[in-house]
């Protein structure tokens, strides 16, 4: 159970990072789909924390994202948020999210320590690695 929970969190966190990817041919969706829909992803939550802690640049980016999400909800062209999606993708919060996903995957693998060496255990270890290295 511990493995499954941890690998599930890792999967979701990497999905939050992939959402910002400009590689539509790999992800199957436009960059920032979740962001444009107002979904609270970890990069956005971390940006909110940084803005609340007094980081002025992050507060400006957050205000721009929030205004864009509201405008899209009111019918504006989703491309309105393209610059903000790029800025969030390049922001430290996205790298922090990826690092968190890796930690969760490592903890999932650590939960397998109680199992004897086997092809099944190795497959589960490989799955954890593939989850955090996927691109879409």
Image: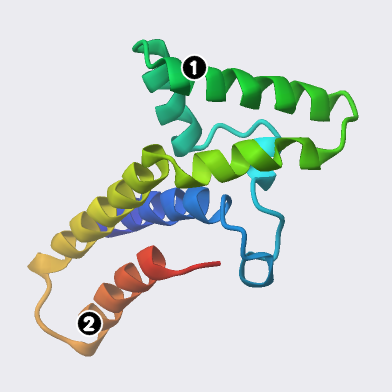
Count every numbered label the image shows and give the total: 2
Please tell me whether mark 1 sits on a helix, a strand or a loop: helix
**Vertical side of 6 occupied by 79: above or below:** above
Q: Residue furthest bottom?
A: 119
**Local crowd at mark 1 within 10 Å, few (<14), some, or many (≥20)?**
some
| Spatial separation of the CA atoms under disc 2 and disc 1 | 44 Å
Q: Residue furthest right?
A: 75
Mark 1 highlights which residue? Answer: 59
Q: Residue at x 44, y 27 (%)?
A: 47
How is the rendered protein coloured? rainbow
Quadrant for residue 70, please give it.
top right
* Front position among marks 2 and 1: 1
Mark 2 highlights which residue? Answer: 122
Determine whether, in the image, residue 81 is placed left or right of residue 19: right
Q: Earlier in the sequence, mark 2 or mark 1?
A: 1
Determine whether, in the image, residue 136 is placed left or right of residue 91: right
């Amino acid at each position: 159970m511990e493995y499954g929970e941890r690998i599930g969190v890792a999967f979701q966190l990497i999905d939050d990072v992939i959402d910002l990817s400009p590689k539509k041919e790999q992800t199957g969706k436009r960059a920032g789909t979740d962001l444009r829909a107002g979904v609270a992803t970890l990069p956005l939550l971390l940006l909110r924390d940084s803005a609340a802690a007094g980081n002025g640049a992050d507060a400006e980016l957050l205000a721009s994202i929030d205004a864009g999400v509201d405008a899209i909800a009111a019918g504006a062209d989703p491309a309105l948020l393209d610059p903000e999606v790029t800025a969030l993708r390049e922001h430290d919060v996205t790298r922090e999210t990826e690092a968190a996903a890796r930690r969760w995957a490592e903890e999932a693998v650590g939960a397998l320590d109680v199992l004897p060496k086997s092809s099944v255990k190795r497959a589960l270890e490989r799955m954890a690695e593939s989850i955090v290295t996927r691109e879409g």
